[in-house]
Image (spheres, grey):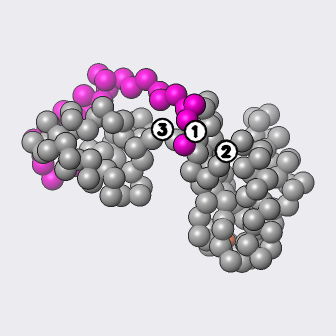
Amino acid sequence: MSEKLKKPEIDMERLTHIVNSYKYQKWSLIPLVQDIQAEFGFIPPESIPIIADALNLFPSEVQGVVSFYAQLYTEPRGRNIVRVCRGTACHVRGGKTVLKLVKKQLGLQENQTSEDLEYTLETVACLGVCALSPSMVINNQVYGNMNPKKLKLLFKGEEDS
Ligand code: FES
C-alpha cells in the first residue's frame, strides 16, 4: 500500500452498532467482520478490541482470524479494484507489458492503493478467460486482448466517467 495513503475516518457509532448486533454471539466472528468490511471496505484496526470485547474473545484471537483469511482486508482498498492476470496464457501474450503499463498509468505497484482511494492494483494467477489473454478485470468487468492502445483508452474512459 502507498505510504501516503490516508486512512478514512471511521464512523465509530456505526461500527459499534454493527458489533452490538452480534454481542455475545462468540461464533459470529466471521459474519461480524464480513459486515464490518461490507460497511467500511476493510476491517479497521480500532474495531479489533471492540469486537473482542463484544464476543468475549481475546483481541489476538480476533486479529488472528482477520489476518488468516485473504478475503478480509486490514487496509483500506480503492473504489475500483484493478486485477491484472499474471497467468501463463496472459504472460506469453504480453501480460507482463500490460501490468507494467497499468502500474505506470495508475502510479501504483502491486497491492497498492492510490492515496485518493480510487484504485487498488492487484495481480491474479488466472482470471479464467485465457482465450482473451492478455486480460484484466476492473471491478467485475473483464477486459481482454489488452494492448497499449486499449489500455490508454480504457483508463482515459475511467477518468472521464
Ligand atoms: S492466464 Fe490469464 S486469464 Fe488465464
What is the three-letter code of the residue carrying label 1?
Answer: Ser
**Residues at marks 1 and 2, CA–CA distance in whole angstroms:** 8 Å
Question: In the image, which residues are magenta?
Answer: 1-29
Is residue 50 shown above or below 122?
above
Residue tagged 3: 76
Q: Earlier in the sequence, mark 1 or mark 3?
A: 1
State the residue at coordinates (75%, 40%): 158
Residue tagged 2: 108
State the residue at coordinates (33%, 58%): 68
Q: Are marks 1 and 2 in contact (CB under 8 Å)?
A: yes
Q: Is residue 140 visible?
A: no
Residue tagged 1: 2
Q: Position of residue 116 (x, y in %)?
A: 61, 30
**Residues at marks 2 and 3, CA–CA distance in whole angstroms:** 15 Å
What is the three-letter code of the residue carrying label 3?
Answer: Pro
Which element is circle 2 on?
loop
Q: Label 2: few (<14), some or many (≥20) within 10 Å?
A: many
Q: Earlier in the sequence, mark 1 or mark 2?
A: 1
Disc 2 residue: CB within 8 Å of ligand 1: no
**Residues at marks 1 and 3, CA–CA distance in whole angstroms:** 11 Å
State the residue at coordinates (12%, 45%): 57
